[in-house]
Each structure stands twice: as structure tokens, then as C-alpha cells.
Image: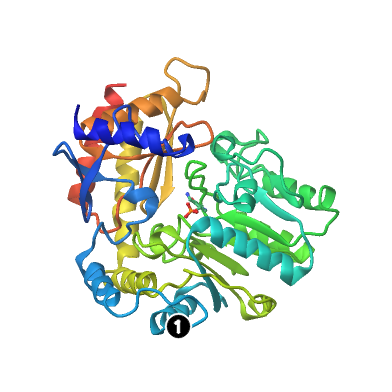
Amino acid sequence: MSETKQYLKEAEKYFMPSLMHQYYEDPILVDKTEMEYMYDAEGNKYLDCFSGILVTNSGHCNPEITEKVIEQTKEIQHVSTVFLTRPMVELGKKLSEIAPGNLQKTFFVNSGSEAIDGAVNLARIHTGRDNIVSLRHGYHGRTTTANALTGVGSWRFIKSDPAGIHYATNPYCYRCPLDKEFPECDFSCVDALEDTIREACAGRVAGILIETIQGVGGYVVPPEGYFKRIKEVAEKYDALLIIDEVQTGFGRTGKMFGIEHYDFEPDIVCMAKGIANGFPMGAYIATPEVADSFTAPSISTYGGNPVSSVATLANIEYIEENDLAKNAQEVGDYAQEKLKEIADKYEYVGEVRGKGLMLAIEVLKKGGKEKEPGSEEAVQLMENLKAEGVIAGKAGTYGSVVRFAPPLTINKEQMDVALEAMDKSLSKL
Ligand code: PMP
């Protein structure tokens, strides 16, 4: 039996089934990673177009970040938040400098889910209200509150909703939940969100939680003007705007934060994933006015851990010095255009969409009804890409979206390899 098969057997024996969601019919045992590449235990090399679920923005095991982390592990590895450390304070300052608008004060945690829970708590404390509105097809995590706020059925294990959580239609123009066309619809989805506030929440709402681009939902990019309308609704009901930048942050969409594409100042922003290039780190940052409401004592044992904080600072420095956001924009625009040309050849590609290096192909059922989601086709496309040496991601409420989100260090020549593989893989469907 191969080493990979042995490890798979042991994983099945020692992991809860919920953790057994490895990609591919023959899952990969990862042996080594290096910038844009992954290597498996069988000696195969892959161009990684998924970045460990949009995490390794500066490249796997980036040597400049690794060196700084090694030095920090020799000095202080852990003391908890009841003591000050230089990296944690320096990171608080740095996040305040790079965060959009007037976001200034941070609470450090370990994951995206925790950042969402914390942000929602903060909104409830600040407003004295309970209701939170989130969007259908949104993904926010696996802790109790973050999972309940999630609107992708396949990733929800919370069977009944904790009180105070409400859903509104998302701006999924390709499959408009209200069966309308943009721009003639004049943002009916935002009107529906307002209805939810007015009807289900009796006008009393603590916050509206939205991803800048829905990630797990299949890279649903809101149309121009969407956030302006959301802001008007939030102001009308005095609701806080909580933006989930867990996937879209840290250069991914062509700006440091996805929300910077829109003229919009959030009250709270949640971050994780690409923040530390693979080290455990999550954070939520708020305006001083909102943040200062959180006075109840709270400890995050590992939050702001000095090793993770040094990794985060080194990662942000690398993103800034190498202008990875600009690279994401340039290579992303180039790839999106090429993907659209490729997609035109296949009637079973419904739409190519995305921003920066967050690119998605919506696959349709071959010979199916109009726009019928092609979930089996998407699984096969992932397998075909793997056979071509390219790792992609899968997403979408219907499991029919294949996504490219490589490290932001990728160049056009490497992207061409991924694009050629996509063309070949689609042709073999
Ligand atoms: N928000 C978004 C938008 C995410 O994509 C994820 C993870 N996929 C989370 C929150 C939860 O992050 P974590 O897995 O680090 O808890």
C-alpha cells in the first residue's frame, strides 16, 4: 500500500468524519510546499491555484517570512494577552494603518470563525440590540454563531438558528434569487434585505454582515453601487456594517482589502486566512467609537501570539514591498480575460467572474436545463486539472463553481500554465 493510502486509512480511523473532506478521489498527501508550488508524497509537482484556501498570499514557506518567524521562536513563543509583547502592539498599529476608513482598535483571535463571533458580539454590545442580518450563500465559519450566520446549506451543521439571526437575498446576478436583471432591478435584493430588517427584526438590528465577495458561495461579486445602497439601509436603521474580509483581505482582490473597491467605510472588519500567510491568526478591527464599547474583561489565550504576530507583520511587509495587490490586479485581469475566451468555447461554462486573483468558473450540467448547476462536472474538472498538475478550489451553493486563487506572487507565465490546463481540462469534460 502506498504511503498516501496508509495515511488516508489512519486519518479515517483517527479523525471525525466531519474532517474527512479532502479533495480528489485519490487525496493528496502533501510532502512539501514552495512559493507557488505543492509537492505530493508520490513525487508529483502541482501549481497551486488555491493557496491553502486563500491563505498563502505571499507564497508557501516564503523565505523572508520564515526567517523572521524562526528568529521570533527563539525569543518568545507564548505569554498570552495578559502580558504585552512588542509584536502584538506593533501589529495593532500596523492593522490600524492599513485598514480602510476609521478602523483603529483590534481584538486578536486565532481564526476567521472566531473573528466573526467576536465582531457580532461587539455589534450587539455596542448597539444593545441582538438582530444580525447576513446573506444567503455567505460563509462565515464553524463556531456556533459563525455557522448559524452561514447561508451555504452544505456547510451548515447548526440545525436550528440561535435567536437574532436573519438572512437576506444575496446579489447573485447570474442566478438572481428574485429572478430580475441588473441594472433594471434597481437593487431589489437590497430592498429585500430592508424588508427583512423591517419585518423580521421590527426595524431593530445590531449589524449587517457581508463578505465583500462571497467566497465559499462561489465568488459572487456584488454589482457596482451595491454597497452604496447597503450603506443607505444601514444608516436608516442605525445598524453597524460588519465586513467579512477573511477571503478578500491582504491584496487578494487587487487592493489591500476588498471593500476598498467600493466607496464604503465599515464599522467592523473581520480578518484571517491571508493575514499571516499560513500561521494561525485572526482579528477584528473597529472604529474607536464602536471598539470602546467592549469594556467587559476578555482574554484570548493565543490571540496576538508573538510568533503569529511576527508572521503577520512580515507578511504585510512582503505584500507592501512587493506590491502584491498590484500583481493580483494585473495577473488577475489578464487571467480573467483569457478565462472568458476559453469559456466561450464550452457551452457548459455559465459564467467567469471574480476580482483580482479571486477567479471563478461556474460550470453547468452538460445537456442539462438552462443554467442547471454542473456539480458533477465541477468535481470532474477538479480531477482533470489535478491530472494537468494544477490545484484549484471548489465552491458555490450548488458545488458547481471551480475557482483559481493562487498565491499573489504568481506571474503571467505561471498563470498561462494554469489557463492552458483549464482549457484542456474543460475540453475533456
Ligand atoms: N469567513 C469567510 C469568508 C471564510 O471564507 C471563512 C473560511 N473559509 C471563515 C470566515 C472562517 O474562517 P476559519 O476557517 O479560519 O475559521
Q: Pick whichever, 422 or 88, lies toward us.
A: 88
What secondary structure is found at the residue carrying circle 1?
Answer: helix
**In this rendering, would 7 be left or right of 289?**
left
Asked if residue 427 lies left or right of residue 275, the reply is left
Q: Residue at x 62, y 64 (%)?
A: 119
> Ligand 1 closer than 8 Å to the CB at disc 1?
no
Residue found 62% across the figure and 44% down from its top: 170
Quadrant that contains the N terminus: top left
Instruction: Name which quarter of the figure residue 88 lies in.
Output: bottom left
Q: Position of residue 81 (x, y in %)?
A: 50, 77
Residue 196 visible, this angle: yes
Identify residue type, mark 1. Answer: Val
- 413 up-or-down from 236: above or below: above
Does residue 285 sit above or below 229 in this rendering?
A: below
The residue sitting at 48% across, 57% down in the picture is 246
Counting from the top left corner in percent of width and height, residue 40 is at 20, 41
Q: Find the residue positioned furthest to the top.
A: 367
Quadrant for the C terminus in the image:
top left
Q: Nearer the viewer, residue 269 or 38?
A: 38
Question: Of residues 14 and 235, which is closer to you in this image?
Answer: 14
Q: Is residue 255 left or right of residue 239?
A: left
The x, y position of residue 21, in whole percent, is 42, 36
Instruction: Give coordinates of residue 353: x percent, y percent.
Output: 43, 43
Which image quadrant is residue 300 in? bottom right
Q: Is 317 left, or right, of 98 in this rendering?
A: left
Residue 342 in view = no
Residue picked out by circle 1: 89
Residue shown at the point (68%, 36%) measured from the top left: 178
